[in-house]
Image (spheres, rainbow, N blue to C red):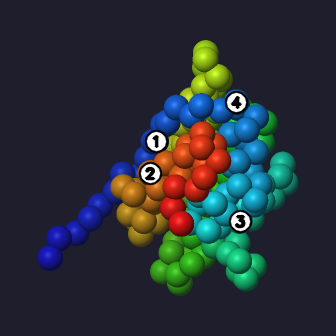
Amino acid sequence: MSTMTARTTQVYSVFIRATPERVWEAITTPEFSHKYFHGARLTITPDSYASVDDAGADLVTGSVLEFDPPRRLVHTWRAMYSPELAAEEESRVTWEIEPRDGGLTYLTVTHDQLESAPLTAVGVSGEGWTHVLSGLKTLLETGEPLFG
């Protein structure tokens, strides 16, 4: 039997052919996020973070720590879709959105403070955040979801 471990700080980056404003909109609105974020409907405002499924059940809860559209978003993260994950301490997610020449945006997502959330660390590592960012990039660049 093998055991998977994940880093307590995970960093993912991607270039996206879209403006920072479009990337921000895709991150913070349920109409976009539902198409690339495992079916989650994200609603993020300066005061709140909500990630719910189609029935309105919480998938991830958190608080917004920084809200600087369209450049930077920082929020806490507690996965609620399993009792084991919900029992862990909150971690933190930072979205950094940087404009680049040629109509590109450089997006970096850092998920950290995972020391007291080892199951969350494993769950979001590898294909977890990679799935989300690949889906976001494809949706913004083609208008079509990557995953059906």
User: What's the mark number on residue 12?
Assistant: 1
Q: Position of residue 79 (x, y in %)?
A: 57, 70
Residue kind at label 3, given as amino acid type: Arg
Q: CA distance from mark 1 to mark 2?
A: 7 Å
Q: Which three-letter amino acid code belongs to the residue tagged 1? A: Tyr
Q: Earlier in the sequence, mark 4 or mark 3?
A: 4
Q: Secondary structure at mark 2?
A: helix
Q: Which residue is mark 2?
A: 130
Per the image, the residue denoted by label 4 is 19
Q: Is residue 28 left or right of residue 59?
A: right
Between 24 and 59, which is closer to the camera in this rendering? 24
Q: Quick check: 17 above or below 132?
A: above
For label 3, the residue is 41
Task: Name the N-terminal-most of marks 2 and 3.
Answer: 3
- Image marks 1 and 3: residues in contact by CB distance under 8 Å: no
Disc 4 from disc 1: Cα separation: 19 Å
